[in-house]
Image: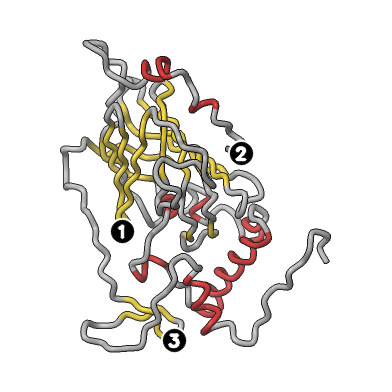
């Protein structure tokens, strides 16, 4: 794990379990993080919302290959008006979409001694399971819990450091969060969920910090901070709205087009693992364009 090290996830089990489990009448585990929250989604609340840095600055964070991907994306946002947002087609939202401005605004946190679950919604559902006290299998391409197959939202382990939950997510399927850069299967994150309390000690929110590591896409780690204001208890207000995306938009001649039920048209099934948004751009909007020339290690 670049930049963080796994030492924080290698504490002796006895010491770690003292921070995790309820034993007898001793309440060693804090449950007041349970609840419904509202994530700050103002434009300037996070650099990932796109309102704090300009595109040239953004590009300095990316490797050359992912710079090209990002420039391609921004060109089609601005010049062809053919963004190809995955959510428009009911495709997977992907791991990084939960950080986007117009997604995942209402997280619900359920804390147990063994697992912390975070539910959220956008065009589809986000479900994060944080397995407390577990360790990754590091024998494959990236650390993982299950098979050596990338998962859309990765796999997450964690431990409690006092009242703060420290997590490590790996085995993420590379994808895109529209309006932000693409990321690879090597993306990993270290995240901290720290309670924010008022002067009386009452829980009023969570300060969420994430550090992204992706050697294929990023030239150095990126830090994202967000604030979740507590909105109420889990058993208050409306229940969690489990969403199912019913597709009504389809790519027609390279543009996202709403089609009514009963419409018959020619459709090419996309390869979700082959940058499907780019395949549409290249087929319909980049005729006559030349791909950037490949260079060697000497820039020639």
Q: Which residue is mark 2?
A: 2
Q: Are marks 2 and 3 in contact (CB under 8 Å)?
A: no
Q: Is residue 285 above or below residue 83?
A: below
Of labels 2 and 3, earlier in sequence is 2
Q: Secondary structure at mark 1?
A: loop
Residue located at (44% from left, 50% from top): 99
Tell which of 68 and 158 is nearer to you: 158
Neighbour class for label 2 at 10 Å: few (<14), some, many (≥20)?
few
What label does residue 220 carry, if any? none
The percent position of residue 6, horizontal first and vertical second, equals 54, 30
Of labels 2 and 1, earlier in sequence is 2
Residue located at (51% from left, 52% from top): 48
Q: Which residue is mark 3?
A: 253
| Residue 171 shows up from this direction | yes
Q: Which residue is mark 1?
A: 124
Q: Is residue 284 above or below residue 270?
A: below
């Amino acid at each position: 794990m670049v930049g963080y090290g796994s030492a924080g996830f290698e504490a002796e089990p006895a010491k770690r379990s003292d921070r995790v489990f309820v034993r007898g009448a001793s309440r060693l585990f804090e449950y007041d993080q349970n609840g419904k929250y509202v994530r700050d989604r103002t434009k300037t609340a996070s650099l990932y919302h796109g309102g704090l840095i300009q595109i040239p600055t953004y590009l300095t964070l990316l490797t050359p290959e992912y710079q090209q991907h990002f420039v391609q994306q921004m060109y089609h946002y601005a010049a062809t008006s053919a963004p190809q947002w995955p959510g428009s087609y009911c495709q997977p939202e992907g791991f990084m979409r939960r950080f986007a401005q117009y997604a995942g605004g209402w997280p619900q946190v359920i804390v147990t001694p063994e697992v912390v679950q975070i539910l959220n919604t956008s065009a589809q559902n986000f479900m994060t399971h944080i397995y407390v006290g577990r360790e990754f299998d590091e024998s494959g391409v990236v650390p993982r819990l299950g098979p050596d197959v990338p998962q859309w939202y990765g796999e997450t382990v964690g431990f409690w450091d006092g009242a703060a939950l420290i997590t490590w997510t790996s085995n993420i399927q590379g994808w895109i969060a529209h309006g932000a850069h693409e990321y690879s299967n090597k993306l990993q994150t270290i995240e901290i969920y720290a309670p924010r309390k008022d002067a009386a000690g009452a829980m009023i929110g969570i300060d969420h910090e994430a550090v992204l590591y992706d050697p294929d896409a990023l030239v150095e780690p990126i830090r994202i901070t967000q604030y979740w204001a507590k909105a109420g208890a889990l058993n208050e207000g409306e229940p969690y709205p489990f969403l199912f995306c019913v597709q009504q938009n389809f790519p027609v001649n390279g543009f996202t087009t709403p089609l009514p039920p009963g419409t018959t048209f020619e459709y090419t099934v996309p390869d979700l693992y082959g940058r499907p948004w780019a395949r549409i751009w290249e087929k319909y909007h980049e005729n006559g364009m030349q791909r950037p020339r490949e260079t060697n290690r000497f820039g020639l």
